[in-house]
Amino acid sequence: MNKVIVIVGPTGVGKTKLSIELAKLLDGEVINADSTQVYRGLDIATAKVTEEEKEGVVHHLFDIKDVNDNYTVYDYQKDARKTIEEVLSKGKTPILVGGTGLYIKAALYNYDLDEEDSVNLVDLSKNDEELYNELIKIDPNTDIHMNNRKRVIRALNYFYKTNETLSSKEKADTILYDAIFIGLTTDRDTLYERINSRVDIMVKNGLLDEAKNIYESNIRTKAITTPIGYKELFPYFEGESSLDECLDKIKQSSRRYAKRQYTWNNHQFNVNWFNVNFKNFDETVKEIYDYIKKETN
């Protein structure tokens, strides 16, 4: 099968588990499409797949960078495309999985990137709201969230360099691979309950120790400040907030992130959505596997 399987969906919905099950059924190899999981040492808060969970399936682009490294969308685009071609050349199925929609877009579409836009034309002293208002005046059709400062800045830079809006460019992009987009979804109450429970499980698995080590390292690179789950705990370590307040902030930020993931995936990709059967995940796997086989016959 010369298709690329892409698994999208909000945080906490089962993308990792599905990717492994499909890899076993489709003779596939998993390729990371999460901007936080490329970094070594960021494991619990990023919900990175464990060696045990991999079940012997080959995984690519996990733990490839140090937290001090500057790893950009441009870098990921090169690495992901090279990996996709290598997996295809072996006659295996590339399975792209992760929550970073921009990574997936960059890997699969003719998404032209400069070497991460080294020249900045935006006034970085402005706060998020000011930058977002600047973007709205230029591009009322943007679907970028105000709190996604990095993407707002990128959209502004793109306009000031090309006099074109990023939203119109994204819609004009052409996909380079024969891909099937699989989306996992569930009702909002179930998703939010799973997200909240997931944070509690992370704490039991050692999130506080992981975050404390990061806090004490004084490293504040993009790798550290981007994921949800580390920076939210810093006020607790500094004695400014209670642990419960910080954990509530992680849960709230995760729920908001899940909503933004839905929005992005629906706007950018032709996703085939499947409601997850959490009581019998094998049924969900079978439904999706049957759909993929039908699409490839």
Image (tube, helix red, strand yellow):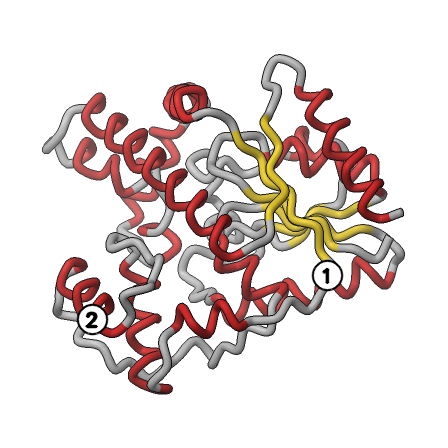
Gap between marks 2 and 1 measured at Cα: 38 Å
Horizontal arrangement in the rendering, residue 28 relative to residue 255 (left or right) = right
Q: Which residue is mark 1?
A: 84
Q: Is residue 199 above or below residue 237?
A: above
Q: Quadrant of residue 104?
A: bottom right
The residue drawn where x is 29% and y is 84% is: 160
For image coordinates 71% across by 35% down, the residue present is: 20
* Type of the residue with mark 1: Ile
Circle 2: element type: helix
Q: Kindly identify which residue carries mark 2.
A: 137
Neighbour tally class for label 2: few under 14, some 14-19, many 20 plus, Cα within 10 Å: few
Front residue of this view, candidates 194 and 40: 194
Q: Residue 130, how many percent across, how many down?
A: 13, 64
Residue 7 position, x and y percent, is 62, 44
Residue situated in front as seen by the camera: 18 or 243: 18
Q: Amino acid at mark 2?
A: Lys
- Residue reaching furthest bottom? 162
- Hey, which residue is sitting farthest left in the picture? 240
Task: Return the residue nearer the eye: 33 or 164.
Answer: 164
Residue contact at pointers 2 and 1, CB within 8 angstroms: no
Q: Residue at x 61, y 20 (%)?
A: 277
Of marks 2 and 1, the one in the foreground:
2
Q: Percent x, y for residue 97?
A: 61, 46
Asked whether residue 80 is in view, the answer is: yes
Circle 1 sits in a helix, a strand or a loop, which is it?
A: helix
